[in-house]
């Protein structure tokens, strides 16, 4: 009889443990920025932006080359250059640096503006993609990867959200 009660107690413990495991939350972690910027729409936007700023990129590369040549020339020929020539080379170098900085600032501002507009335009789709992944995966909790100090990659659902975002954007 004691054996029977022990068996019933052990079976009850297994049932209780099984229901406790069944009630544990299903957790997912998503890197929102990565999910969004790995999407097909983001890649298409990047291609458009690269094409749009191709001339600025070419000009910046040209200025960089010219600046490097000026610096190398100034270092190589410093001992034989007159003071006026040194001032002219220094002035040219400063002018090229200012131009480079202006191009860089203009492009950075435009990129930041475009990225922000893209984020705003995709906000609803991103929310829908996350909701669809949550429903399909039975997640109880989805955390933003930026807010989590550590997580095992098995919890990462970023790729699923990106795939769903691509699906919803078609």
Image (cartoon, grey):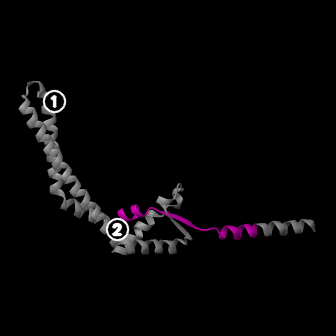
Label 1–label 2 contact, CB within 8 A: no
Which SS type dominates the magenta stretch?
Answer: helix
Q: Nearer the viewer, residue 85 or 25?
A: 85
Image position of 11 (left or right of 50): right
Q: Quadrant of residue 11?
A: bottom right
Comparing marks 1 and 2, which lies closer to the viewer? 1
In the image, which residues are magenta? Answer: 14-38
Residue 156 in the image: x percent, y percent?
49, 61
Decide whether residue 19 is among the magenta residues. yes
Question: What residue did someone put label 1 on?
Answer: 75
> Which residue is pictured at 12% across the width and 32% down the height?
73
Circle 1 — which element? helix
**Earlier residue among tags 1 and 2:** 1
Q: Quadrant of residue 74?
A: top left
Q: Quadrant of the N terminus?
A: bottom right
Decide whether residue 155 is among the magenta residues. no
Q: Nearer the viewer, residue 2 or 166?
A: 166
Tell me if residue 56 comes above or below residue 158 in the rendering. above
Extreme-top residue of the structure:
79
> Which residue is pictured at 51% across the width and 75% down the height?
135
> Which residue is pictured at 34% across the width and 74% down the height?
169
Question: What residue did someone put label 2 on?
Answer: 119
Q: Quadrant of residue 160?
A: bottom left
In space, the residues marked 1 and 2 are separated at their CA atoms by 47 Å
Residue 154 in the image: x percent, y percent?
53, 59
Q: Quadrant of the C terminus?
A: bottom left
Image position of 125 (left or right of 85): right
Tell me if residue 137 comes above or below residue 156 in the rendering. below
Extreme-right residue of the structure:
1
Residue 57 in the image: x percent, y percent?
18, 53
């Amino acid at each position: 009889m004691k054996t029977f009660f022990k068996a019933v107690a052990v079976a009850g413990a297994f049932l209780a443990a099984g229901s406790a495991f069944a009630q544990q939350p299903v957790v997912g972690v998503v890197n929102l920025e990565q999910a969004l910027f790995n999407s097909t729409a983001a890649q298409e936007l990047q291609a458009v932006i690269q094409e749009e700023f191709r001339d600025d990129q070419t000009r910046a590369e040209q200025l960089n080359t010219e600046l490097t040549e000026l610096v190398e020339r100034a270092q190589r020929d410093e001992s034989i250059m007159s003071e006026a020539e040194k001032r002219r080379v220094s002035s040219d170098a400063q002018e090229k640096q200012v131009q480079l900085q202006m191009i860089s600032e203009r492009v950075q501002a435009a990129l930041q503006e475009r990225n922000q507009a893209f984020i705003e335009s995709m906000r609803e789709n991103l929310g829908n993609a996350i909701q669809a992944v949550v429903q399909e995966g039975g997640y109880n909790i989805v955390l933003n990867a930026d807010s989590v100090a550590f997580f095992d990659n098995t919890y990462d659902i970023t790729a699923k959200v990106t795939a769903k975002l691509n699906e919803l954007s078609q």
